[in-house]
Amino acid sequence: METSKASKLGVIISSTLLVFTFCIFGPFQIYLTNVSEVFFSFGDIWWVCALAALISGTVIIAIGLFLKGKMRGFYCCALWGLSLALYIQGNFVPTDYGTLDGKINWEQYSGVGIWNTIFWLILLVLPFLLYKFAPRFWRPTRNYIALVILGTQIVTLCTLFFIIDIDFDAKPNRDFQLTNLGRFQLSKNENTLVFVLDAYDSQYFSDFIEQHPEYKETLWSDFTFYPNTVGGATRTILAMPQILTGKYYTNEDSYPQYLENAYQSTDLYRALHSAGYNIGVYTDSQFISPSMSDLIMNMRSGRKQIRSYPVLAYYLYRLTACRYLPHELKKNVWMYTGDFNAAADNTGSEESTYLIDDALFYRDLTQNGITLQDDTNVYRLYHLFGAHGPCTLDAKAQRSKTETSLEEQQMGVMHILETYFDKMKQLDIYDSANIVILADHGSLNYTQNPLLLVKRGQETKTFTRSDIPVSYTNLHPTLLSFLQKSTDFGKSIFDLTYEDNKERFFYIHSDDGVAVEYVIQGEASDPNNVHETGKTFSVFVNKEPEKYRLGNTLYFDAQATGLQYAVKGFSRPEASHTWTDGHEVILSIPLDETAQKDIFVSISLLSVLKGSQRVGIYINDQFLNNYLVCADHLNFTIPKEMAGKDELLIRLELPDAASPGADDTRILGLAFESMVIGEKQVTDKESEILSRNYSIGDKIVFTEESNGTRYFSSGVSYIETDSAWSSGKAGQIILAMGDFSGALMGEFELKDIYAGPQKLIVRSNGQILYDAEITSVEEPVKFTIPEGCVKNGQLVLDLEYPNAVSPASRHESTDNRELALRFSSIYFYENR
C-alpha cells in the first residue's frame, strides 16, 4: 500500500509535469522557435503562461489531494499518462500538416488518425496497467520519469534562450510598428498605389474573371492583366521583402541583416522622397528595416499594442493545442497564425497598428473615406489578406462567422477595391493614379505564378490581357517609371518584349532551412516549366563560414557549429542532433591549413534510419568509396591528394534515405551529432585503421591473438574462443589492400548457423557478389570479387543478414543479439 505522503508526492509531481508541459514548455518552445512570425514579445506572454500554470496547477493538485486511496492512484495514472502523451506528441510525433494558414484537407490524414489514436490509447492505459499489476515498479518509476522529462524540458528551454538570445521585452529588430497614420490620405496631385493581395494565384483570377466577365467592364476596365508573371519567393515572410525592396533573400545573411542591406540598396524610396512623395507602407513591421523610419511616414517606435491579453492567451494555447493534442482533436483547434491579430489594437485609429485584416480595412474605409492633401504626392502600399485561406470574407467584404468559398472571398476583395476606386473617382483622382494590384505569391503548384494587374495614370482603355513574360524583378523599375526615373536593375513592364525574361527565377524556402532556386522557362502557370537550377542556399550560413582547423569538433546539435558548412541536405537542428534530409548531403569546409598527410574523418551519429544506410562518399567531386552504416559512427580516410589545399567538399549519397512515415515528409538517413576531421597521426582511430592492413592470401581468424573482428567496421559480436557471431541484420568489412587492382575470390568459413537457414547478401560498391541461403557449414561460402572493387586501396564489403534473429525473441535465452552466421575464418586470394 502506498503511504499517504508518497501518494501526495505522486500527485504533486504528476500535476507539475502536466502543467509545465502544456502551460509553460509548449507555448515557450513554440514562441522561441517562431519568434519572427509573431508580433508580441516574450515579455507579453511569460506572465500569461505563469498565471495559467499557477491557476491550473493549483486546481489539479487540489483535486488530487482531495481524493483518497485508489481514486488518488487512478488520478495520478491519468495525469501521468496524459502528460507523457502530450510531451511525445508535441516533440517526437511528426506534426507537419503544412503551412499553419487555417485550412487543411483532413481527409488525406485519415491513416494518421488511426495510428495516432492507438498510440494515445496505449499511453493513457499503460499507467493503469502498471498501477494494477506492477505497483512496486510503478510508484518510484513514475516520479523518476516525470522528473527526467521535466529536467529535459528545462534544459531545452535554456538552450533555446541561449541560441536565440531573446530580448525579454521586445522582439529583436522589431521594436517599432507600422501604424494606420495616413492610410486613407491621398494627394490631389500624383498618387501611386500598390495593393498586395496575399496568396492570390493568377489562375484564380483568370478563372474568376471568365466566370464573372462583368468585372472587366467595371472594376478592371483600365487595367492590364499579366497572367504570365513569375513572383519572387514563397512564403510571405520572404515574398514581401522581395516586393518591398526588389532583393531576394537567399540566406547569405541573417534575416535582419538581409532586410537592412536590401533596403539600403534599393532606389525606390529615395527616388519617391526626392520626387516629393509622402510614403506610407501598410503591412507587418517584420518585413521592414528599422533604418527606413526617416522615409516611411507611418513608422513609429514601440511595439504593436496588445488590446486583450485574454484573447492573446486563448490563441497562444490554441496554437499549443494544435501541436500537442492528438490528431483527431487537432481539427477542433486548428488556426491561422494571423488570428493573433485579434489580440492587438484594432480600433482603426491613426495611432493604432496596421493589421492585415480585409474586413477591418473595409470597415475603416467606409467609415472614414478618403481625404486629400495639397502639398505633396502620395505613395501607398497596402497588404491585404486577399485569397489567403481560411476564407472568411463574404461578397460584401463582411467577416463571416462560418467559412466562405474562394469565389466569395474574391468577390469580397474586389468589393473592397471597387469601393476604394469609387471614392477616388468621386474626388477626381482616379484617372491620374498609377495602381498596381499584385499578390505576394501564388497558391497553386510551386506558388510561382501570382496575380499582377497594372493601371498607368492618364491611360483610359478597356480591360487588356498581356501574355508578355514578367518577373517581379520588373516591379521596381515599373514603379520608378511612374516617376520618369530609370534604373540599372532591369526593365519596367512597359519596356518588356517577348524576347525578354526567357529565364525567370523563383525561390522556395523549406522548413529544413534551405532555399532552393528554381528557373521558369516558358508559361509561368505551367508547373512543367519549373525546374531546379541546382543552386541551394543554407539558412544556417548567416555569415562567411569560419575556416576549419583540423582536429576541432563540429557539433550538429543545438549549437549547430557544423551547419555553417552545410550546403545541402540537412534538416533543422534539434536539441542533440541534426538529421540529413534528402538523398544528397553536401558540406563545403574551408580549411585553415593544408593537410600534409591523409585525412581521417569521424562522424558520430545519434541514429541511423531503419538501422542501416548505404552511403556513397565523394571528396572534391571524386569518388572515395561506398559504406554501409549501421552503427553510431561513420569513419573514413581521405588520401591527401584528394583533400585539396584550401577547401574540403564532402558529398554523401544516401540512396536508402526515406520518409519516416505518417506526416513527416522529410527524407531522413543519418542523425549527425558531431564530426572531427584531422590528419591521421593525430586521430585516436589511427591504430584501428592501420590494423586493417591486409595481405592477399592471409587468413583472417577469430582468436584473441589475431582478433579478426578488427576488419569489421560494424555487424560483428565478440570473439568466442575461435569464432565470432555476426550481430544485427547488416555488417561491413573494410580491408586496406594498398595498390592491389585485380579480381579476387572470397571465402567465409563458418562454424555455425543460427535458426537456419540464413540468407547472406554480399555487396561491394553497390554490386551484388553473393545472394543465397546458407543451410550448412560443411562448405565455405565462396564468391567472386570483380576487378575494380578495391577503391583507393580499400576493399569494402557490405553484408546483409535479413533473417537474423535474437535468442531472446525465440525465448531460448536472454541474449538480445540478432544472430545469423558464426565466422571461423575469412580468406581472400587472387582469382586467376
Image (cartoon, grey):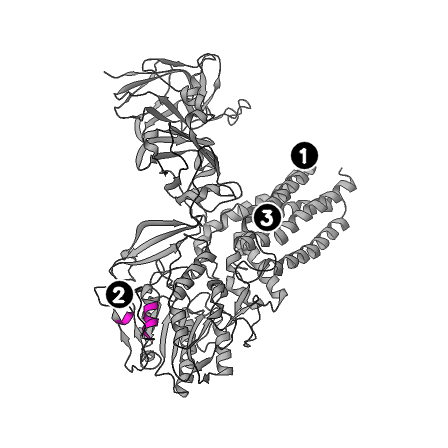
Which of pointers 1 and 3 indicates the residue nearer the eye? 3
Residue farthest toward the left in the current orientation of the protein: 499
Q: Position of residue 421 (x, y in %)?
A: 40, 81
Q: Quick one: SS at disc 1?
A: helix
Q: Which mark is residue 481?
A: none
Upstream in sequence: badge 1 or badge 3: 1
Q: Quadrant of the C terminus?
A: top left
Q: Residue at image x 49%, y 82%? A: 366
Q: Position of residue 201 (x, y in %)?
A: 36, 66
Which of pointers 2 and 1 indicates the residue nearer the eye? 2
Q: Quadrant of the N terminus?
A: top right
Q: Which mark is residue 469?
A: 2
Give the vertical position of 331 relative to 457 (above or below): above
Q: Which mark is residue 137?
A: 1
Q: Is residue 653 visible?
A: no
Q: Which mark is residue 157?
A: 3
Foreground residue among 260 and 99: 260
Q: Residue at image x 42%, y 67%? A: 198
Task: Quote the CA–CA distance across marks 1 and 3.
Answer: 30 Å
Residue 710, quarter of the rendered image = top left
Q: Quick one: SS at disc 3?
A: helix
* Left or right relative to 31: residue 205: left
Q: Quick one: SS at disc 2?
A: loop
Neighbour class for label 2 at 10 Å: few (<14), some, many (≥20)? many
* Left or right relative to 255: residue 67: right
Foreground residue among 497 and 487: 487
Upstream in sequence: badge 2 or badge 3: 3
Q: Which residues are magenta?
A: 476-494
